[in-house]
Image: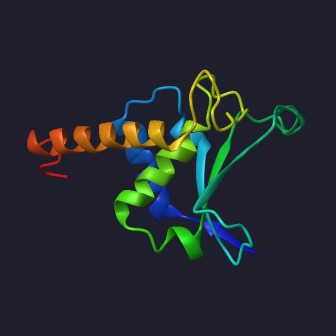
Amino acid sequence: MQVEKAPDVQVMVDDIVTTLNTDYLNQHRLICMRSRESSANAYARIWNLPNIWQKALDVGTFYVIEVLAEHFDRLPQDKKEQVLVHELLHIPKTFSGALLAHGHPSAPVNDRTAMRLWKEYKQKKEKLARSGAFEGE
């Protein structure tokens, strides 16, 4: 398996986090990577840095969103955004280094919640575009 940084995905994640105003997500501690030749059958997955490693390395919490190039890169833009929203749902509001499982009671990690948040994201993007917030950038 080959792994490299994914600056294009990083831009999308940063935009989603900013647009949805998810204050608990520290964009500087979310790292996006792209893997190739993985045997996994997924669009993306999220990795955490467990607490024991944080303490051993004397670093804070980090999360890595890995997109699997063979599957993710072929998706249309909207579906890519939906996948990234889904991966972000795995991060608890405490940003502790833990990961929320699918169907977690305090923050359901499922396609319905991801779709609801993605629609909210798209509505906010459209509202910003209509208001001219992006003019001059």
The image quadrant where one finds the N terminus is bottom right
Classify 90 as above or below 9.
above
Q: Quadrant of residue 126?
A: top left
Q: Quadrant of residue 94?
A: top right
- Residue 89's x, y, as percent? 55, 37
Q: Residue at x 57, y 36 (%)?
A: 109
| 16 sits left or right of 55 in the view | left
Between 56 and 113, the one lying in front of the other is 113
| 96 sits left or right of 14 in the view | right
- Residue 88's x, y, as percent? 54, 41
| 40 sits left or right of 92 in the view | right
- Residue 14's x, y, as percent? 44, 46
Between 106 and 33, the one lying in front of the other is 106
Number of numbered callouts drawn: 0
Which color scheme did the rendering employ for the protein?
Answer: rainbow
Q: Quadrant of residue 11?
A: bottom left
| 83 sits left or right of 1 in the view | left
Q: Residue at x 60, y 51 (%)?
A: 31
- Residue 113's x, y, as percent? 46, 36
Between 55 and 116, the one lying in front of the other is 116
Q: Residue at x 74, y 73 (%)?
A: 39
Q: Residue at x 38, y 30 (%)?
A: 21
Q: Residue furthest left?
A: 131
Between 91 and 51, the one lying in front of the other is 91
Classify 135 as above or below 80.
above
Classify 48 as above or below 61.
below
